[in-house]
Amino acid sequence: MRSVFRFLLAALTAASLAGCQSVASVDSATAPVDASVKTAGTTPVEFPQLTCAKYGKPLGLDAKLTASRVRKGDPYYIEFRYRKSYAIISGHMYDVFGRLDKDGNVLTRQYIGLFPSGSVLGLYGGAIVPVPGELLPSSRDCDYTPGAAYRVSLTADQYQKLLVKVRQALAHPPLWHMEFYNCNHFAAGLGSVAGLRPADAHLLPSFAYIHAFIKANGDKEVSG
């Protein structure tokens, strides 16, 4: 009994300090990849299972940008977001990606982020050993107002590289571990298609990691 108590205490403590502590909803179970382009809203998307359409929001949720690196004429983007979690103070970091119009306005939003499978048991188990991961957006990704958002535009070539990474991840979801590979690491890792690098302080909670990630890549946050 004492060993069980020590395990729970250690897991709870780690969950309060490490990044990427958000529990996926039942709807976030990994689904097969549909490589065809389908429509969510009025503009085609590559991965309809990664939109918020099933939650009644085909175009997803807008976010006030904390930092932005958008080049005029780039037709695509990736956006790194942080949101609060109903269960864990560290919150959750995830990616949104899609198409831009000629003026740099968002046309589509597709969501992807790494969660531990198994709800709370997976979360606490992942504090000790790697557990299977899930990638599809939860209702909270679609409903919660982001606490921070960092948008980087992509060329057509960079976007194709991003699609390859997303397709591979959906086909073989990575293992989740609270310390060694959580949502912060997965979200920041997709930024490699644009030459972005992860923050050095990889154990920061998500609400702090996203700001360290912005700083690590030389971008300034918008004041106010």
Image (spheres, grey):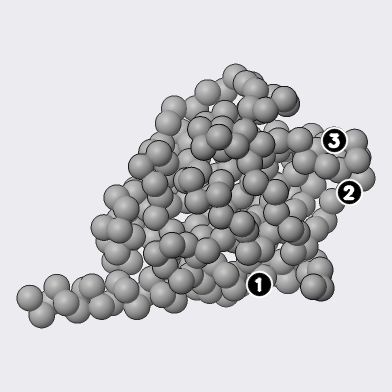
Q: CA distance from mark 1 to mark 2?
A: 22 Å
- Residue drawn where x is 46% and y is 71% of the image: 89
> Which of pointers 3 and 2 lies earlier in the amino acid sequence?
2
For residue 101, which numbered disc appears in the image?
3
For residue 212, which numbered disc appears in the image?
1
- Name the quadrant of the C terminus: bottom right
Q: Amino acid at mark 1?
A: Ala
For the residues bearing labels 3 and 2, Cβ distance under 8 angstroms: no
| Image x and y of residue 186, in percent | 53, 54
> Which of pointers 1 and 3 lies earlier in the amino acid sequence?
3
Q: Amino acid at mark 3?
A: Asp
Q: Which of the 4 image quadrants contains residue 23?
A: bottom left
Q: Residues within 10 Å of mark 2 (few under 14, many from 20)?
A: some
- Residue drawn where x is 53% and y is 23% of the image: 34
- Residue that mark 2 sits on: 71
Q: CA distance from mark 3 to mark 2?
A: 12 Å
| Image x and y of residue 18, in percent | 45, 71
Is 175 placed left or right of 149 in the picture? left
